[in-house]
Image (cartoon, rainbow, N blue to C red):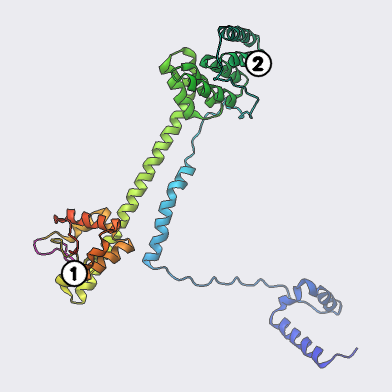
Amino acid sequence: MELSPEHLKQLRSFVEACKQNSNLLYLPNLEFFRRWIEEMGGKIPAKTEEAPKAPPPQETPTEAEAEEPKQEAAEENVSEESEESEIELDDSGVVEADEDIDQRFGDETLEITDEMIELANDKRNEALDAMASGDYEKAIQLLTVAIQNNPTSANQYAKRASVFIKMLKPNAAIKDCEKAILLNPDSAQPYKWRGKAQGLLGKWEQAYQDLSTACKLDYDDDAYKMLQDVTPNAKKIQEHRRKYELKREMKEMKLRKERIRKAREEYEKAKGQSGSSGTGASTGGGFGMPGGFPGFPGAGGPGSGPGGIDISQLLSDPDICSALQDPEIAAAFQDVSSNPANIGKYQNNPKVQKVINKLAAKFGAPNPPQGGSF
């Protein structure tokens, strides 16, 4: 077989490449070539480990760029801390939620007769006997008949709810209790059994509230025992929520102070630049606004105006500092500071007007009239 010049050129290039990097011979698709070299008595160099590539140089972030991730991380810490500080609850006794069942209610629009009430009472008594013998299904059927014959009786629904509790069907019990509460909100029994049902579902705060209400309306030892059972978990959840709210408030306060600090730094920076350019306090404007805040004594530029208030008093007000970070408000102040007649354009802008009134109160000046100046 005669090799063409092109094949020879490719072979020569391949050999040169192998000289430069013998690891090429260890490519999986060149296994046949390695075997041929070894069969011919040749020796293949050992495979060398390639040095890891150096990571590309990273640019050093500026101080402002580095500060932004810190602030974002601080804001995210609130939710992260909440997730990390999990509560250890005693879930013994909690059951799986029951699905919807064929739960029949009475028709409250019916005209109830004495015979219907008597039948309802008889069925209720039979249901109590069935409960005592442990036949809860029969008790439910009998109480359903009692409810249909006396549909406005809250006690009938509360009694059926108590049977659903014994059958570990808390959702069904809650439905009966809510119906009973609508019929008679001053009855303790519906709150008692709904509280017990909420406890079976692990809803400790709701259970605590219902059982507390039951004990206030009509104390009984059984309801109080139920209340004692759910109180530890309910208190843990309430305490956890209070701690979380406190952490969140402290975090918000810290971020607010940081924003004020940055606003002061920006002001000092602008003040230094204004002084170095020779503009002086009479022509320099606070926050980059020429003329400062004309119309407000003592707010006419960096430092303090003649007989006025030091600008630091302005910066100490978090509401004003925060407002001046708003591009719309900053643009309005720039516009009116350069031409006080332009104030009329912002008379119907509640956002800008609110800051104007705030500044007026801050520096003891009356609210600027239309066509006046800031």
Tell me the kind of residue under disc 2.
Answer: Gln
Residue highlighted by disc 2: 141
The span picked out in magenta is: 299-307
Q: CA distance from mark 1 to mark 2?
A: 86 Å
Residue shown at 31% from the left, 61% from the top: 325
Mark before the other along the chain sequence, 1 or 2 = 2
Residue 202 locus on image (x, y percent)? 54, 29
Prevailing secondary structure class for the magenta stretch in the rendered image: loop
Quadrant assignment, res 157: top right
Residue drawn 62% across and 16% down?
144
Residue 29 in percent (x, y) is at: 79, 73
Residue 65, located in which quarter of the rendered image? bottom left
For the N terminus, the quadrant is bottom right
Q: Nearer the viewer, residue 126 or 199?
A: 126
Residue at which label 1 appears? 291
Q: Is residue 48 visible?
A: yes
Residue 233 appears in view: no
